Image (cartoon, rainbow, N blue to C red):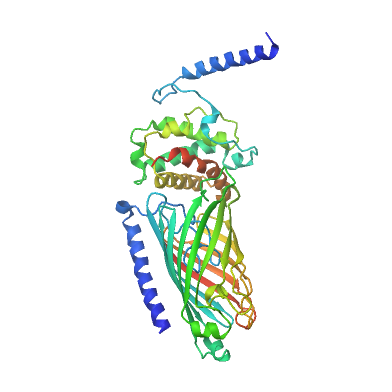
Amino acid sequence: MQGRLLTKVSLSLAALCALAVTGVARAGEINTGGKLLLTGGDSSLEGGAGGGLATWSVIAGNETRDGFGGKVHLTGVEVSDYSLRAAGAAVGLHDRVELSVARQEFDTGDTGAKLGLGKGFTFRQDVYGVKVRVLGDAVYDQDRWLPQVSVGAQYKKNNQGTVVRAVGGKGDSGTDYYVSATKLLLDQSLLLSGAVRLTKANQTGLLGFGGDRSDSYKPQFEGSAALLLSKRLAVGAEYRSKPSNLGFARDDDWVDLFAAYAINRTVSVTAAYVDLGDIATFKDQRGLYVSLQAGF
Amino acid sequence: MHPFLQRAALATGLGLALAGAALAQEVPAGEKPVDAYVQSNANAHAQPLVDKATFDAFGGKDGLIRIAADTVDFSMADPRIKDIFATTDVPRLKRTLAEQFCYVLGGGCTYTGRDMAAVHKDMGVTHRDFNAMVENLQKAMDKAGVPFRVQNRLVAKLAPMQRSVVER
């Protein structure tokens, strides 16, 4: 069932991608997109513009203040004992407001049976996000220290409330609030980004919200550093801290090393090595993260 | 007169004389006359780099003259922005752009063009247009074999001009 739903999301995303590509093919007339390559950022797992694990203050899509842009993504993460599939879309309005939606499927695979959930048991989470750029410009303000600062919120809804509560979680939905600052240090060809997120989410919400150990909002940090090697290629690292609310299993911080490549103005790919730490008592979840994005 | 005041008066006189000279500009061969304005490196709208290594990596003044000319040529052939240059004095634009690049990279050139807001007044340049021009500059720098990370040092100097150039 979940698989089928994801297929449906994938199909509609593919249609959106096709639309975006058509848009670029006809760029002479409708002139979509005016941002410089890679300056729109990547798509984060939660749907908005960011690194992969971390959220950035940039607004999704290729469009400048002159209009509307957007981005869709398909992401797969394969670690030792689990897989995560995500698909999402974001629109950027005048490079000021970003609205995003993402569906994530956390597939326990064979591990599900060992956890007593059943083989292939899957947690599904939908994330609805809004982000507003409040000051600064990450790209143009090269003569100031001021980064681009955005504030945002993400409403997350998990479909496995019963299991979440059974393992000590308090709820199947939650809202994260964050402030993000991103700065491109162009003379160093370096991008730095940091965000503080108030959250109750367990494994970003894939295992629900709040828990027997704690059920209060705690500030968490996420940061990215990326080196621009060419117009098309950036490499970098990310870190994301998480609260540990559940007694049965600790939430570890996440890290990754990534490479992002813009195939053309529309399509980009990101590959990363991720270390997600322990997840639901299974140790050292490390593996590969691959994401395909289309921006317009 | 107090020596300081005397010096100040002299400096003012000198300044006025210089301004007068600047106002009576000669029109370089191949260029059209422009309305009088006060020449100043401040018009270049950026603090020059102190380290000359970047300037050298661009091939010095000659390299920048070529890059400026290519940037203008690419832009005039670019369907996205070519209309903006319909009435442009092309030789003058190429010359002043090369001067500006040379000045901001610390090459010791004098920038003789007008300031960014005055030059682009009423052109209706959009963010998209500005970025298209940057892409053409990148293309010109690629053609000249300037390494990407060195290119970014020039783009970093030019990026803030977006605030004065973009009107819409």
Q: Nearer the viewer, residue B161 or A29?
A: B161
Residue B116 location in percent, x, y?
A: 47, 34
Give the image quarter of residue A114: bottom right
Q: Nearer the viewer, residue A84 or B34?
A: A84
Q: Is residue B155 left or right of residue A72?
A: right
Single out the residue that lies furthest toward the top: B1
Q: Is residue A104 left or right of residue A211?
A: left
Give the image quarter of residue A99: bottom left
Looking at the image, how many numbered discs can be counted on the residues?
0
A230 relative to B15, above or below: below
A129 relative to A209, above or below: above
- Residue B156 in sight here: yes
Which residue is at 48% across, 53% downward? Answer: A133
Single out the residue that lies furthest toward the right: B3
Q: Nearer the viewer, residue A115 or B153?
A: A115
Residue A56 location in percent, x, y?
A: 53, 59
Which residue is at 61% across, 65% downward? Answer: A220
